[in-house]
Image (cartoon, rainbow, N blue to C red):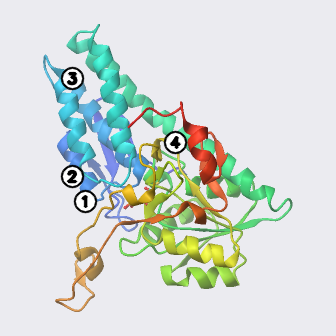
Amino acid sequence: MTLEAIRYRAGSLQILNQLLLPHQTVYDDLRSVQDAYEAIKSMKVRGAPAIAIVGCLSLAVELRAGAGGDDPVNFIRESLYHLTSARPTAVNMGRAARELMEFAENESMEKNSEQLRESVIAWIEDMLERDVNDNKKIGNYGAQHILSGVPRDSVTILTHCNTGSLATAGYGTALGVVRSLHALARLKRVYCTETRPYNQGSRLTAYEAVAEGIPATLITDSMAALTMREMNISAVVVGADRVVANGDTANKVGTYQLAIAAKHHGVPFYVAAPSTSCDLSLESGKDIIIEVRPPEELTSINGVPIAAPGIEVWNPAFDVTPHQLITGGIITELGVFLPSELQAALTGRLTAL
Ligand code: MRU
């Protein structure tokens, strides 16, 4: 069974509402860029690649209905600007916006409004296929790299947040590596962290693992160091919202402490991300803007209060893992690189941001 987080047919877009998972499977229609903006902001859809794909597909839906009239370029520019502002940390939406805008401007030199709309829609539709293909390559490169350290054994992986089919166009990044290991019959077990405060691990990764029969065990975030010591973890594999030039990586809050614990226990720590999640325009992680989310995500669960009323809350959605702690490597669709090799590997392959 393959989970379909994004359902797109020419002119119509639906997303699996991730606020309701795992208990209800409800697809919401997104009819406009504004609908997509709200779905991204409220985290009905989340995960760096999925945010970009859903944002751009919502634009394709509006363009197919003739949005932008005689000036589609202006409509595209304003829409992309709006979508990029929904969640600031993941670079994917900003990168897609930059590339799409450049494409639209070039096309507008020689095409009329109708032709321009058609070619922009085709560019956007292509994103779905490209993302799944890239994820499969990431899965394969990651699995081979991890297995090269253990020629005959099955491996035990620890992962964080949700980086699977629900966070991408399909297959996933870090969870794609887990899927590939499972497909090779070399995955003993994956430990997935609960991922407080939003519980992407217990709600979403656990849901994907159960649905596909991947051997998985849920742990609380505070059990990670103990799990590394007791459960013979072969590697930690996480996703990324933004990997910058020196390899510093922003990902779901809690990633940083996993990397510290992995270093202490001698467990290789990998980041799995498509090159579209890389941002060579920033030199180090201190330049990354970290999204701070509402206090209610900590103080209540499904509307039920769990914290002492009146307590002050700090709720950053992401943290930055310094490149020195990414000891296994950065797994991309182009191969696996040490943080120090990333910039050279990607230069010339990524458009400037
Ligand atoms: O706040 P979220 O759920 O959007 O955070 C998701 C993550 O941090 C993922 O690890 C990252 O976006 C990569 S998803 C392939």
Q: Residue 276's spot in the image, x, y percent?
A: 47, 41
Q: Which residue is depicted at the point 67% across and 52% down? A: 142
- Mark sitting on residue 238: none
Real-space Cα separation, disc 2 to disc 1, in angstroms: 6 Å
Q: Residue 239's spot in the image, x, y percent?
A: 51, 57
* SS type, badge 1: loop
Answer whether labels 2 and 1 touch (C-beta < 8 Å).
Answer: yes
Real-space Cα separation, disc 3 to disc 2, in angstroms: 23 Å
Residue 242 appears left or right of 70: right
- Quadrant of the image occupied by residue 119: top left
- Mark sitting on residue 38: 2
Sequence order check, earlier mark of 3 and 2: 2
Q: Is residue 104 above or below residue 286?
A: above
Real-space Cα separation, disc 3 to disc 1, in angstroms: 28 Å
* SS type, badge 4: helix
* SS type, badge 3: helix
Q: Which residue is depicted at the point 56% across and 43% down? A: 343
Answer whether labels 3 and 1 touch (C-beta < 8 Å).
Answer: no
Real-space Cα separation, disc 4 to disc 3, in angstroms: 26 Å
Answer whether labels 3 and 2 touch (C-beta < 8 Å).
Answer: no
Q: Residue 129's spot in the image, x, y percent?
A: 49, 34
Say whether residue 5 is visible: no
Q: Is residue 305 above or below residue 58?
A: below
* Residue density around tag 3, few if under 14, some if 14–19, many if 20 or more, within 10 Å: many
Q: Residue 195's spot in the image, x, y percent?
A: 44, 72
What residue sits right under mark 3 in the picture?
Answer: 73
* Residue density around tag 2, few if under 14, some if 14–19, many if 20 or more, within 10 Å: some
Q: Amino acid at mark 4?
A: Ser
Foreground mark, 1 or 4? 4
Label 4 beta carbon within 8 A of ligand 1: no
What residue sits right under mark 1 in the picture?
Answer: 42
